[in-house]
């Protein structure tokens, strides 16, 4: 199998795994972790693509995504802490007060 | 620059008065309200003097562009020619005197500024009407006059009856306005322009005399004129319009509004000359109106309603003259009528105020000694209205119409007889009112004498009501034709067919004798009260007739049955408004959609993610499908 195809397949599988886990998990920390998995899957796709084209663009995008993931985790953790303080639980379905 | 200022000054002042509604002091309001009309009158006089130097050439001034659509053009263009100069002078001068009088009359009213704002707007709209160079601008002024009459008749809006009278005036004249609008559409369709000189120039080439199209147009325009000028069958609004303050009645009856119809017919005289049927209709409407309104005026008990019916009757004379092709005679009667009718209304207002807002003549009487100044000017006004020979303006103008209704090409013996009957009635109803108010015993105490600002305009108008007649004397007496010469560039001279001095003398003698006879009858009826006459008046048939006339020949009753009640019935049936169902239905559909979509907003985060994923999958599927398949 061509290395690019393999890399892209791996990235796709990782992304779908992250997506499935975010849909089935109710624990909000696991949902945050799943988002990280999806982000890394996307970053992997960039790296594979840049290796395929022989350019450095994908590497640069990876750095961007890494920085963004760090920021996202810090905001996400702060939100999780607040949620826990308010509701005394980490179940995301409990935080369903804002409905139509 | 001057002509455009004449209508613009009152508009600006009305605008300022509306802005300064509550903030301006009474003196400031009076100065602004009267001063603007005074200034307009001064500008009008200066312009008229400039114009008189070369009165063959109309002054046209383009103030601003208004509507430009394809070949159709209508600008805010003002036109001064011999005809509009006469109207502008009467409107501004008489309007100014009425404003000065109103400053005294309305002094204690809490809505002083609103009153003067509406009055100035009224004068401005009327000036626009008579100075318009195209029919669209004329129509603008026409509707402006209608709006202001609504605002002023319903000025004391707290009484529902006044609001009803205001709505009635607005709606009844609207019937005529609609006819006029259709007439304007037809004019544009056939001539391709609404510019008045163009229409007047083109129409003799477009149509032969008596062509159906031009007859229809002339009749539609006549419909508009009939509505505004309160002629049969749209006269019912005018007696009720007395609900407004007295200066408003003076303004509506003398200087503005009701004479708009006379102006329109005179302005479009070429069309009427091409349509003999429309001309005959005008004359017949005028003749019938002047007689019917004369009978109604004879039996009214409210002093202002007598004057209202007398206005309808006198405008009937003007329509009669227009219908006979005696254009300048109609305009002459308009001028003298403006003077003496403004005088009579304002003198009546002085009486009404002096008697603490008492309008019933049965409660008046004996005021000759108590209000000598008002007595004097009222006598002058009554004499002019009743056309007492030689000394009054009303005699010269009315006599000319009576004579021409017989002798002009479109004249007829029947029209002449109606005009003579009208002369008798005018003498009778005018002096019945005069004797009832000023003779006999005093029945109500005088509590308040009119002040200077009310009396001075009355004296000026009394002088004008007397001397204005001498600018046009019949050729049996001096033959002065200053007025018809002045109008000659715009309005063609009347063609007289059976012209003989002997016949003219006979006609004049008859009208004079009938007027004086009418006064004599009124004197016998009100003051002498001989036994035979009172018995005659108390006969049941006469009594019934009296009540029938007092109700204005039951026109209101018939219109209520034929039009008002069916309309109210229909609107009751359609209370839930069929058309409205469409819009409420649309609103209900939106609400239903909202309820359905609101359910998807559950607050459950994972459902939202699912929705985003499905959306992304859908978008990607479409993209991939478009690229690869």
Image: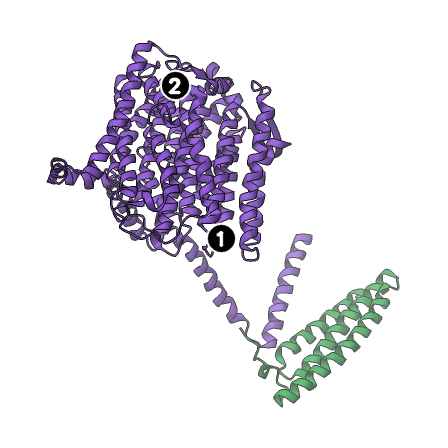
Chain colours: A green, B purple
Q: B159 left or right of A13?
A: left
Q: Is residue B252 above or below residue A30?
A: above
Q: Is residue B477 above or below residue B238?
A: above
- Residue B588, x across and y down, in percent: 43, 61
Identify the residue under disc 1.
B112
Q: Label 1 crowding class (10 Å Cα cut-off): few <14, some 14-19, many 20+?
A: many
Is there any visible trace of residue B81 in the rendered image?
A: yes
Front residue of A97/B259: it is B259
Q: Name the chain letter of the residue that bears numbered label 1.
A: B
- Residue A65, x across and y down, in percent: 80, 71
Identify the residue under disc 2.
B325
Residue A62 occupies which quadrant of the picture?
bottom right
- Residue B65, x across and y down, in percent: 61, 34
Front residue of B66/B525: it is B525
Residue B220 occupies which quadrant of the picture?
top left
Badges 2 and 1: C-beta atoms under 8 Å apart?
Answer: no
Q: Is residue B430 above or below residue A9?
A: above
């Amino acid at each position: 199998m061509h290395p690019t195809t393999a890399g892209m397949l791996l990235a796709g599988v990782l992304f779908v795994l992250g997506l499935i886990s975010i849909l089935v998990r109710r624990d909000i920390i696991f949902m945050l972790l799943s988002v990280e998995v999806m982000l890394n899957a996307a970053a992997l796709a960039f790296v594979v693509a840049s290796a395929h084209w022989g350019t450095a663009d994908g590497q640069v995008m990876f750095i961007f995504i890494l920085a963004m993931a760090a920021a996202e985790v810090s905001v996400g953790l702060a939100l999780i802490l607040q949620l826990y303080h308010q509701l005394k639980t980490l179940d995301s379905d409990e935080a369903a007060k804002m409905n139509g | 620059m001057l002509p455009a200022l004449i209508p613009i000054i009152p508009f600006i002042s009305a605008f300022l008065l509306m802005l300064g509604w509550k903030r301006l002091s009474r003196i400031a309001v009076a100065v602004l309200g009267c001063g603007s009309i005074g200034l307009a009158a001064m500008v009008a006089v200066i312009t008229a003097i400039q114009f008189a130097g070369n009165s063959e050439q109309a002054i046209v001034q383009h103030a601003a562009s208004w509507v430009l659509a394809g070949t159709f053009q209508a600008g805010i263009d003002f036109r001064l020619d011999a005809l509009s100069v006469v109207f502008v002078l009467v409107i501004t001068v008489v309007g100014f005197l009425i404003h000065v009088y109103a400053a005294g009359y309305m002094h204690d009213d809490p809505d002083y500024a609103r009153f003067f704002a509406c009055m100035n707007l009224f004068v401005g709209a009327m000036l626009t009407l008579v100075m318009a160079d195209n029919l669209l601008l004329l129509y603008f002024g026409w509707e402006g006059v209608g709006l202001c009459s609504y605002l002023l008749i319903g000025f004391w809006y707290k009484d529902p009856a006044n609001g009803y009278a205001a709505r009635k005036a607005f709606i009844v004249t609207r019937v005529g306005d609609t006819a006029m609008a259709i007439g304007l559409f037809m004019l544009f369709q056939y001539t391709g322009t609404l510019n008045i000189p163009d229409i007047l120039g083109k129409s003799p080439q477009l149509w032969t005399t008596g062509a159906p199209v031009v007859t229809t147009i002339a009749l539609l325009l006549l419909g508009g004129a009939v509505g505004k000028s309160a002629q049969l069958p749209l006269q019912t609004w005018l007696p009720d319009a007395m609900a407004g303050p007295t200066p408003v009645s003076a303004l509506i009856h003398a200087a503005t509004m009701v004479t708009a119809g006379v102006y329109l017919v005179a302005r479009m005289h070429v069309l009427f000359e091409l349509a003999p049927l429309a001309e005959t209709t005008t004359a017949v409407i005028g003749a019938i109106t002047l007689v019917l309104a004369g009978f109604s005026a004879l039996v009214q008990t409210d002093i202002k309603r007598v004057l209202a019916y007398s206005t309808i009757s006198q405008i009937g004379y003007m329509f009669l003259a227009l219908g006979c092709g005696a254009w300048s005679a109609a305009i002459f009667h308009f001028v003298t009528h403006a003077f003496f009718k403004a005088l009579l209304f304002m003198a009546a207002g002085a009486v009404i105020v002096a008697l603490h807002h008492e309008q019933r003549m049965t409660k008046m009487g004996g005021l000759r000694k108590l209000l000598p100044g008002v007595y004097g000017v009222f006598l002058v006004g009554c004499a002019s209205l009743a056309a007492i020979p030689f000394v009054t303006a009303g005699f010269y103008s009315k006599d000319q119409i009576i004579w021409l209704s017989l002798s002009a090409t479109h004249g007829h013996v029947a029209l002449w007889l109606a005009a003579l009957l009208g002369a008798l009635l005018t003498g009778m109803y005018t002096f019945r009112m005069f004797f009832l108010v000023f003779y006999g015993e005093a029945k109500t105490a005088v509590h308040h004498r009119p002040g200077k600002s009310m009396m001075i305009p009355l004296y000026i108008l009394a002088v004008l009501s007397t001397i204005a007649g001498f600018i046009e004397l019949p050729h049996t007496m001096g033959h002065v034709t200053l007025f018809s010469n002045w109008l000659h560039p715009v309005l063609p001279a009347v063609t007289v067919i059976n012209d003989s001095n002997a016949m003219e003398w006979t006609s004049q003698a008859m009208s004079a004798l009938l007027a004086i006879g009418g006064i004599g009858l009124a004197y016998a009826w009100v003051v002498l009260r001989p036994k035979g006459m009172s018995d005659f008046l108390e006969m049941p048939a006469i009594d019934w007739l009296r009540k029938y006339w007092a109700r204005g020949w039951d026109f209101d009753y018939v219109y209520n049955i034929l039009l008002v009640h069916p309309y109210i019935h229909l609107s009751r049936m359609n209370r839930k408004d069929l058309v409205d169902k469409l819009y409420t239905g649309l609103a209900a559909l939106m609400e239903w959609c909202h309820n359905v979509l609101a359910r998807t907003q559950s607050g459950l985060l994972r459902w939202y993610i699912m929705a985003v994923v499905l959306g992304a999958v859908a978008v990607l599927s479409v993209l991939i499908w478009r690229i690869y398949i």
